[in-house]
Each structure stands twice: as structure tokens, then as C-alpha cells.
Image (cartoon, helix red, strand yellow):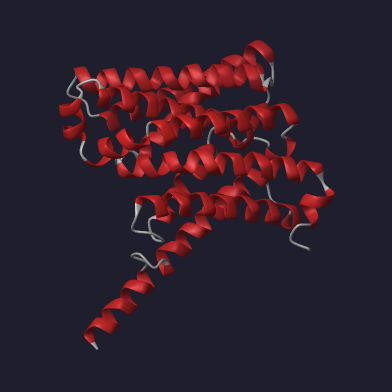
Amino acid sequence: MMLLQPFIEFGFMRRALVACVALSLSATPLGVFLLLRRMSLVGDALSHAVLPGAAIGYLLSGLSLVAMGIGGAIAGLTVALLSGAVSRYTPLREDASFAGFYLGSLALGVTLVSLRGSSVDLLHVLFGSLLAVDVPSIVLVSTISGVSLLIFSLIYRPLVIDAFDPTFLRAQNRWASPLVHGIFLVLVVVNLVAGFQVLGTLMSVGLMMLPAASARFWSRHLSGTLVAAMLLATAASFGGLYASFYLSLPAGPAVVLSAAILFFISILIGPCGGIFSSRKTLSMAKE
């Protein structure tokens, strides 16, 4: 009962937990596919690319989550499209293209926020304010999560084929692969925007990628990996908020730190390739 006490007594803790769980259900499956497609750093790049649009929304409307969210979505999609075009029509690889755009976007976003806001406003945009999540923010994040899961379920099969055998998908339909890839990037950007609402632009990618990487050590099957990623993200959300309440830690970083701790635990004891489990398997094989 003590574990649930903060969430029973305080509304801000319940709202923060609901927002994190909604993100855990929609963002972590996308993180799994980013890893499968060897695009894990693209998620980090897109999370930074959101910043200029969020900063412009902030300059126009103050700390309005709707304005900043719309601006962030436009900026993230613009960077995704430009990076794809550069990698397609120039010799530059996609990861290098994303890196160039996201570094410029990060610098531009910080500059724009600094023009009008204080250091407190800049910290709010960069690291979020999880415990200050209100009902409209929960509605927005939950809506994005629900729509993302629906679209993800619709493109799941071609997305799996594109991740493991893109040549086969292109042979079936030349437009299928770029279309699926484009929809997938849109989902990534939209979920990062939802994450930015509560965790900030620098922290939102943590809840997307860390549980996805951890899940690799708990299942060898894609379906099991997806479920494990969602469960690990939910556990990190609960653990991080619980720690932030009793240890007086900043909530957003505490959630991501909890996800990082679960990642290191998975590396050590995960049954599918963890360090200790692998040693145990080798010792048993020698015997």
C-alpha cells in the first residue's frame, strides 16, 4: 500500500504516471523498431530537432503546450524530410545527415528560447516539468498515444518486412518501403513531441530508447521484445516517480534514470544475452 500512497493521495502524481504510461505504450515499440533498423541515434537527433519549433511556439504563445507541440511537430517533420532528401540525393549517409541537422536545430532552439525567456524557461523546455502536467496535457499525450498505436498496428506487417528484408518489400511495391518509412518517422516525431510535453526535449528520447534496448535481453522474439519494452518503460515510470517523491529528485530525469538502471540490470542478468546468463550457459555447456 505504501508503494501506491503517493499516487492515491496526490493528483499531480497520478497525472504524471498516466502521462508516462501512455508514452510507454506508444513510444517504446517505435524504439524497438529504431533499434532493428539501426536508427537508434535518429531518435535522439529528432528529439533535438523538435526544439526550434517548440521555441518558436514559446516565443509566440509563451509556455503554451499546444503551440509548442505544434511547432515541435512541424520542426521535427521538417528535419526528418530534409535529412531523408539529403541522404537520398547526396553521398552523405542518413545518420550523418540527421546529426548535422539536429546539431543546428539544437543550437537554434536554445538561441530562440534565450531571446525572450529566462534560464528557468529554458530548463523547462529542455528537461520538461513532469509533475506540472495538467489535464489538457494528459488528453493530448493520451490521444497521440492511442492514434500512434492504431497506426502502428496498421503498418506493423510491412514495417517488420522493411526492417528485415526491405528488398522484398520494394519488389512487391516500389512505393511501399518509402511510404512505410515515412509513416514510421512521422510516428517517431509525434511521440517525441508528446514526450517533450512532459519530459522535455532532451529527456523524451530516453523513455523511447532505453526500455527498447533493455527488452533485447529479455526476449528473442519480436512480439516478446515489444511487450517487454512496454513493461520495462512502465516499471521505469513508476519507479522514477516513486523515487522522485521520496528522494526529492527531479521527476523527468528520475524516470529516465530508472530506465537506465533497468538497462544495466538487463545487460547483467537478462536471460537472452546478459553477461551472467551467458557465462552460466557457457559453464553448463563445458560441464
Q: Residue 266 in the image: x percent, y percent?
A: 44, 62
Residue projecting furthest to the right: 9
For the question of whether residue 138 can be seen, the reply is yes
Assign the N terminus to one quadrant of the image.
bottom right
Q: Residue 89 in the image: x percent, y percent?
A: 20, 17
Q: Residue 255 in the image: x percent, y percent?
A: 60, 49
213 on left or right of 123: left
Q: Residue at x 33, y 65 (%)?
A: 273
Q: Residue at x 34, y 55 (%)?
A: 221
Nearest the camera: 15 or 241?
Answer: 15
Q: Residue 218 in the image: x percent, y percent?
A: 41, 61
Nearest the camera: 5 or 150?
Answer: 150
Residue projecting furthest to the top: 60
Nearest the camera: 159 or 129?
Answer: 159
268 on left or right of 139: left
177 on left or right of 51: left
For the question of whether residue 106 can be seen, the reply is no
Assign the C terminus to one quadrant of the image.
bottom left
Count of numbered marks: 0
79 on left or right of 282: right
Q: Residue at x 68, y 19 (%)?
A: 64
Q: Is residue 88 above or below residue 150?
A: above
Q: Is residue 192 above or below residue 261?
A: above
Q: Residue at x 38, y 74 (%)?
A: 276
Q: Is residue 103 above or below residue 259?
A: above
